[in-house]
Image (spheres, rainbow, N blue to C red):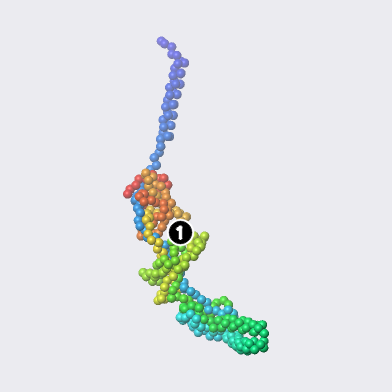
Amino acid sequence: MKKLNVSALALGIVLLGSAVGASSCGNRSNAVQKPVETPKVVVKAMTAALASVEQISELTGNVLPYAENSITPAMSARIDRILVDVGSRVGRGQVLARMDETQFSQAEVQFNNLEADLARYRKLYEEGGISKQQLDQLETQVSVSKHAIDNLKVNTLLTSPISGVVTERNYDPGDVYMPGKPILTVMQIDRVKVLVNVSESYFPEVKQGMPVDVKLDLYPGEAFPGKVTLVHPAIDAGTRTFTTEITIQNGNSKLRPGMFARVTLHFGTADHVLVPDVAVQKQVGSNERYAFVVTDGIARRRTLQVGRMIGNQYEILSGINDGEQVVVAGAQKLLDQSPVDVSM
């Protein structure tokens, strides 16, 4: 019987164990390195296309009188008569109220006396009875008196500087006028105006004389043509807008100050992408709008600059190009760079 070599047997067992261990580690390493596939999100998409879109800006404002005047004297005085009432139509230069005439009457008498004196002084000067200096002094007095009486007349006989309608009356005859509220307010409404704040992006395009459509909720289905009559030269840094004045002819007086108006400015047409409203998402807590565009099976989030709503479609000013695939269903499940399976 042969004697076993114990040392050789032990060495063989050790080598066999090492080989088995190495094989097991190799299998575990291969299992960890194997990539895990991210499941694809099934979405619906459509191809974006350019369309000719009318470029308009829709704004709101209030109807204002074309001109408005407060009828007041320059000083406190008793009101003698008020010759019109609220609703009265008045003409330019028409006397609307009379103040107490005591001061005016006294000044008129003094002026008449000075004029009579001036006539005598001129005759005396021609005869050599007085000096040129004396004549000049009296002529100056007459001029100052004439200016004072003209001022008193304006503040005694209160006239309207415009043709219009009396819209406010705050006093009665016998009251003493005190600075504060006017005695009367007159508004010119045969034409009216609307002031709107237009986005600065349209500043180069808004010109005096350009036509404008004005609509009022009070008159549904009816449009009133107007035109731009004034463009303010400065832009408000806080709102990024500039003020524009729209004038509307109002011969039939259908438009009244204080009415709510909707103004539409027209800027021609432009080719922009249109996408369904369901494709445009809104970031919670902000005004950011975004959509997902699919390229090579990956959904990529795009921040959008959105124009106006046309039917059930949004005008896209930037963010989506012609011919790109836009997700229209399933966007709620997506993150940027999500793999997708597109169902058209």
x, y percent for residue 220: 37, 70
Percent x, y of residue 309: 39, 59
Q: Indicate whether 283 appears above or below 135.
A: above
* Kind of residue indicated by mark 1: Ser
Rendered residue at 38%/53% (across/down): 279
Residue at left offset 35%, top offset 57%: 52
| Figure quadrant of residue 206 | bottom left
- What residue is pinned by disc 1? 201
Mark 1 residue element? helix
Q: Is residue 124 left or right of residue 185?
A: right
In this picture, is 29 found above or below 278? Answer: above
Q: Residue at x 43, y 34 (%)?
A: 32
Residue 61 visible in image: no
Task: Bin the neighbour count of mark 1 within 10 Å (Cα to Cα): few under 14, some 14-19, many 20 and up.
Answer: few
Does 141 sit left or right of 67 as displayed? right
The residue shown at (44%, 19%) is: 12
The spot of residue 168 in percent (x, y) is 50, 78
| Foreground of the two, 109 or 28 | 109
Looking at the image, which residue sits at the far front? 127
